[in-house]
Image (spheres, rainbow, N blue to C red):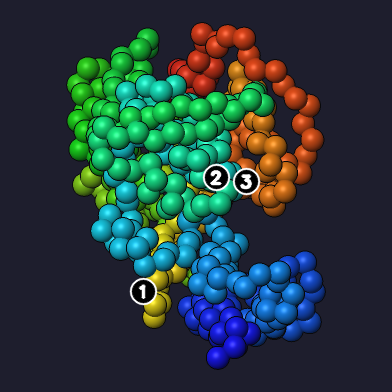
Amino acid sequence: MSIRTKLTLVIVSGLIAFYAIVGGMMSGWSFGRVIANPGPYPQLKIFEEVVRHIVNDYVEKPDLNKVRVGALRGLADGLDPYSAYLVPQQLKEYQANRGHYPDMTGLVLGSVQRYAYVISVLPNSPAAQAGLQARDFIEYIDGHATPDMDLIDAYAMLSGQAGTSVELTYLRRGSRVSEKVKLTRAQVSQPKPELQLMDQQIGYIKIPSLQGQAETVQTVIKDAIKRGAGKIILDLRGSAGEDLQTGITVANYFLKTGTIVKVIGRKEKLLNSYEAKPELAITDLPLVVITDATTAGAAEIVAAAILDNKRGDVVGERTFGVGTQQQIFPLDDGSAMLLTTSRYAAPSGRFFFPDGVLPSVEVKRQDLAAASIPDDADNEPSPSPATTPAGVPNKNSTPTPTPAPTSKPTEDTLLKKAIEVAKSKKKSA
């Protein structure tokens, strides 16, 4: 069989398998070329043209398997940061970890302009001890460029045996000089919620992570009530773990009735709607929730449920915007497509990804310098404003460079505003 025939069969068969799975979900996508009859088959003709050029014009004998894998990765890469093509070994690791790699660094990552982006850093974790901060861009993990990998790849590279190390190259907000840091992997424990009773009987509850913390949060809320709290501030900054059930349960502590979160599938089909259970509600005390761009996942479910049910105010910044479910579609060669098949939405129907949760009381922070996107990102496609986290400039705009602050302000402007809002609320009868 000729190289031309082999290459055509390998690539086109892989693409046909992919389209059989997604059902033409990419119809209309045309590499900047208008197709009169959008759909999967006209798109395949474009790929056939590419294959023909590779066969006839490429300078060397191509590695057929590498070309096929690259083509399938490229298809998934054009969807969203959470969809991916998994080669057989990746699929085995993914299934062994049930989709969640062990947290050995304390980094919660998202994707901005195809770079791994630090949504939050867990306190006392290896990443925190090494000085990494939320809103850092991770350029390389052990020398591998993050724009060339999926988020699954990034998490897989960060996981490993305790005591081993991983080297990261990162770019900080307000800087154009990359830094290198070596993290020593270790078991990361989820930080516990903290309670502080403030002036005018305001119970301030800081929740650094909601991951598996439903019962602990319940205990802290009850403790605040026992200590005489007449109002509650729930600080969800830095809480970025994905845990659907925990987010539902914690929101339910403050809601006797109403929708907490919706799961929306293809063609806007409602797959599930989670309603508040009266028996789980703990308190009807006046409530204020604090969010910022480091709030994601389960915490967004809580914030949106409180806001949309008019249970309280959300003060601060727009949240990062995470909330999708993926499904594995095995392929004949032992590989698989990991595809986003549904998204979480607020009771109002607004999707968390990519929109995030908009606060009812927005606070503009002056201590954040404009983010400097890595120089070689200029060749990458720019996201729409909705896919850019709060505080990260869209590359379609040309913001005036802002120098990094010389010192951090001592005043917590978001907490100050939350206290002001809480004080204005009337106590429950």
Tag 2, which secondary structure?
A: strand
Q: What residue type is labelled 1?
A: Gly
Q: Mark 1 points at which residue?
A: 334
Q: In which quarter of the image is the C terminus?
A: top left
Percent coordinates x, y for residue 309 in the rendering: 44, 45
- Res. 207 in view: no
Which image quarter: residue 209? top left
Q: Residue at left 43%, top 51%?
A: 153
Left or right side of 385 for 120: left
Rate crowding at label 1 as few (under 14), some (14 to 19) or many (20 or more) other CA atoms within 10 Å. few
Q: Residue at left 26%, top 40%?
A: 161
In the rendered structure, which disc, 1 or 3, sits on the residue that comes first in sequence? 3
Rate crowding at label 3 as few (under 14), some (14 to 19) or many (20 or more) other CA atoms within 10 Å. many
Q: Furthest-front residue in view?
A: 60
Tag 1, which secondary structure?
A: loop
Residues under numbered marks 1 and 3 in contact, where contact means CB atoms less than 8 Å apart: no
Q: Residue 145 carries which label?
A: 2
Camera-nearest residue between 208 and 215: 208
Query: Residue 250, relative to residue 274: is it above or below?
Result: above
The total number of labels drawn is 3
Percent coordinates x, y for residue 288 in the rendering: 43, 29
Task: Using the numbered discs, state the Cα–Cα distance from disc 2 to disc 3 in whole angstroms.
Answer: 13 Å
Which image quarter: residue 98? bottom left
Q: Residue at left 59%, top 39%?
A: 389
Which image quarter: residue 183? top left
Q: What residue type is labelled 3?
A: Gln
Residues under numbered marks 2 and 3 in contact, where contact means CB atoms less than 8 Å apart: no
Q: Mark 3 points at which residue?
A: 113
Q: Residue at left 57%, top 48%?
A: 147
